[in-house]
Image: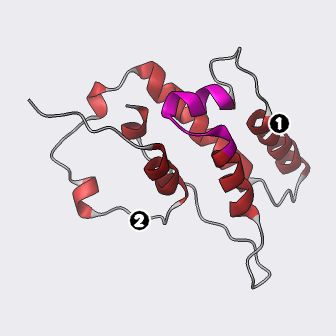
Amino acid sequence: MQRQQRWQPESLIHELFGPDFVLPEQFYGSNDTATRFSGERALMWAVFADGVECYRRNAAQLTQEERVEFRDADRWMRANNWDWAFSFVNLCETFGFSPTAVRRALRRSLQPANSGTMRRRRFRPITLHAAA
């Protein structure tokens, strides 16, 4: 019997904000685990990934629409609402993240680098293996 891999919160956060590349063994892996995940967890991961991407993508706030999307994502991220299944804190709890650490990492990812330009990496959510 194969032991199910347990993901550590630190490695998931690193993967969320890490470089944008995929190794061949990740793409062509022989262990197809996508079928093991529930639709609910996959949906929760999609909501979490979309919220993070909206926050990062609209941080520059160049248009009115971007300002609205950024404010919505920022409000969602800062709220400590435990009553809603898709709240930021509940999603972090579901995936084993510290909401404070994720908030700090998101804010840090938007801070200007020494060159005066904004440090931006495209957010590419790790697919369903985080929803395990």
- Badge 2 vs badge 1, beta-carbon distance below 8 Å: no
Residue 92 falls inside the magenta stretch: yes
Magenta stretch: dominant SS? helix
Gap in angstroms between the C-alphas marked 2 and 1: 30 Å
Q: Residue 25, percent across and down?
A: 22, 58
Quadrant containing the C terminus is top left
- Mark 1 = which residue? 75
Q: Residue at x 49, y 66 (%)?
A: 19
Tell me where the magenta segment starts and ends, as one range. 89-100
Q: Mark 2 or mark 1: which comes first in sequence?
A: 2
In the picture shown, does residue 4 fall above or below 62? Answer: above
Report the amino acid beneath label 2: Phe
Q: Quadrant of residue 131?
A: top left
Of 58 and 74, which appears nearest the observer?
74
Q: Is residue 25 left or right of residue 71?
A: left
Q: Residue 85, percent across and down?
A: 62, 18
Outermost residue toward the left? 1
Q: Is residue 94 left or right of residue 128?
A: right
Of 30 and 93, which appears nearest the observer?
93
- Mark 2 = which residue? 21
Outermost residue toward the bottom? 115
Q: Quadrant of residue 115?
A: bottom right
